[in-house]
Amino acid sequence: MRKFLLIILSIVILLLVGIAYYFYDFLNTETTALSQRSGDLTFISDRAGNWDIFVLDQQDQLHNLTESSPAHEFFFSYTFDSNHINLFSTATGKVTPAIMNADGSDFRAMEQLEAGMAMMQSGQLDMDAAWSPDGQKLVWLSIRDFNAELYLGNSDTSEAVRLTNNNQTDQQAAWSPDGTRLVFSSERDGGIRHIFLMDVASQDVTQLTEGESAHHQPVWSLDGTQIMFMSERNHPLLDGVFEWVVINADGTGEHILAENEIFKGDATYSPDGTQFAYISNEEGSWHIYVQDVNGTVQRVTDGTANHLYPSWRPVPATLPAAED
């Protein structure tokens, strides 16, 4: 009997060692290097009735990636291999994570634990790339410790450093126009999602919002004086009714965006540094504009619907350059 127990114990120890080795190797996988080529421009829009994920491709063709879902979809991010999009959806009757291929196929809404396992199985731990205004740095989200944390590295993801380290999620980072600060959302305040500001050089963090309501997706104004975010103080995300709140970058002057108040911001810089996309409600509804380095501005969305939160699809450095 004793010999039998020793055999069982040995098997268990070997299994545990094998599992530990697997996870150590998996979690220490190198981050995919990204090229400085600009991919398709992706954003959310309510032009189809619900909030959906749309992509404007290199031929200026518009595609609804979540057309198959009758629910609301938002908070999307590309994995660094550029093959998958992680997002949130109300398809289950709750706000839950979802995963789909970059072309919109194989859409799956799931519970948090199931989504985490799916991401681990795919081997894609890094996502939501945001290039700095000067094109030299990149901030992104990684789940290498089974939790969403922010990382900072060179534009190709080399020499990465971890910016956040706590047992709650830190995500949705956005660069200030001068590249010295990051604004992001986090649940570090008692599990309620709030807006935080980080000085990139010192990594000092300041909490900008408080209270019992969750806040999401902070973005900077183009002049860097204000920050706008989505708030659940009056409408839960499940309703698909988004309420925008504006606050000064020093944490003062918090207020709900007034009916006729204009906000221009969410500058999202292309990897090649030649242009940036931004949002503005100057023409009534929210539209997306693209400005070139020479100052030329073009509105790239049309109609009376709302279009928000542009993001450039990342292009892995291993992909061959497109032919002329």
Image: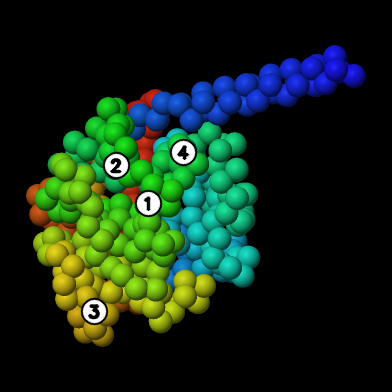
Indicate which disc, 2 or 1, sits on the residue closer to the N terminus: 2
**Residue 298, position as x, y percentages in the image:** 21, 60
Mark pair 2, 1: CA separation: 10 Å
**Residue 8, position as x, y percentages in the image:** 80, 21
What residue sits 74% from the left and 17% below the top?
Answer: 10
- Is 19 drawn above or below residue 174 in the view shown? above
Mark pair 4, 1: CA separation: 12 Å
- Residue for badge 4: 145
User: Label 2 is placed on what type of residue?
Assistant: Leu
User: Label 4 is placed on what type of residue?
Assistant: Asp
- Residue for badge 2: 163
Left or right relative to 242: residue 253: left
Instruction: Report crowding for label 3: few under 14, some 14 to 19, many 20 or more residues within 10 A (C-alpha).
Output: few
Indicate which disc, 3 or 4, sits on the residue closer to the N terminus: 4
What residue sits 36% from the left and 43% below the top?
Answer: 165
Hey, which quadrant is residue 265 in on the image? bottom left
Left or right relative to 11: residue 310: left
Label 3 with label 2: CB-CB less than 8 Å: no
Hey, which quadrant is residue 42 in on the image? bottom left
Indicate which disc, 1 or 3, sits on the residue closer to the N terminus: 1
- Residue for badge 1: 170
Mark pair 4, 2: CA separation: 13 Å
Indicate which disc, 4 or 1, sits on the residue closer to the N terminus: 4
Give the SS element for disc 1.
Answer: strand
